[in-house]
Amino acid sequence: MIADFFRSSSLFELRILSRCWKGLPVYIPLILLGACSAGSEYREGKYWHHGSERPYMISGVMYYPQVHYKYAAIGEASWYGYDCQGLPTATGIKFDKDKLTAAHRTLPLPSVVEVENLENGRKIQLLINDRGPFAKTNHRIIDVSQRAAKILGFKAKGFARVKVACIPKASRVAALSYQRKPY
């Protein structure tokens, strides 16, 4: 097929083609690097953004995602719901305010955490599948879904003092279900 093209092409066409091919060795590495870019992919029903593992900047602040499941902190939790309903999370799955999910700035995606409301003692396990909170206060350590806030008993108030602890075994299982290498 290529030989037929060269036999039927005029000298002018061959000159143009040879000029194009001279620059091709420069473009091949760029094309190959583009294929390795940190875009997103769809793999067996799971949508994943590779960029969720890289450091990122929000409002001039750098965040460095963890590469381990060692995490425990006490701080403030808030909830999000209506304004994000149906939007893609950092894992690419559409946000549903009625699911037991949460957002964290640096935990590996996905991770499973236990959140305890220190004001009333209620506990719940949540799947971290998004990034946040990015409110201007540093006291917030986690954003939970509307349903999780209702179960934890702070939906009406909007925020609560909580203890958040990562559950390594459940996080590894969640990572495998998302076809991710667990940490």
Image: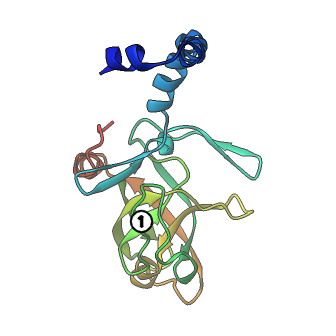
- Measuring from the top left, give residue 12's x and y in whole percent: 59, 16
Amino acid type, mark 1: Val
166 and 11: which is toward the camera: 11
Q: Quadrant of the C terminus?
A: top left
Is 120 located above or below residue 65 in the figure? below
38 and 154: which is toward the camera: 38
- Measuring from the top left, give residue 82's x and y in whole percent: 54, 83
Q: Secondary structure at mark 1?
A: strand
**On the picture, is 169 further left or further right than 61?**
left
Is 140 located above or below residue 35 in the figure? below
> How many tags in the picture?
1
Is 4 located above or below residue 69 in the figure? above
Does residue 5 show up? yes
Residue in view at x 51 percent, y 80 percent: 81
Residue in view at x 40 percent, y 68 percent: 101
Residue in view at x 33 percent, y 14 percent: 3
Q: Quadrant of the N terminus?
A: top left
Residue ranking furthest to the bottom: 156
- Measuring from the top left, give residue 108's x and y in whole percent: 42, 45
**On the picture, is 23 further left or further right than 112?**
right
Does residue 36 show up? no
- Measuring from the top left, give residue 175's x and y in whole percent: 29, 47
26 and 145: which is toward the camera: 26
Is 69 located above or below residue 83 in the figure? above
Is the image coloured rainbow, by chain, by secondary structure, or in one colour?
A: rainbow
Residue pointed to by mark 1: 115
Residue in view at x 46 percent, y 23 percent: 32
The 10 Å Cα crowd at callout 1, few under 14, some 14 to 19, many 20 or more, is: many
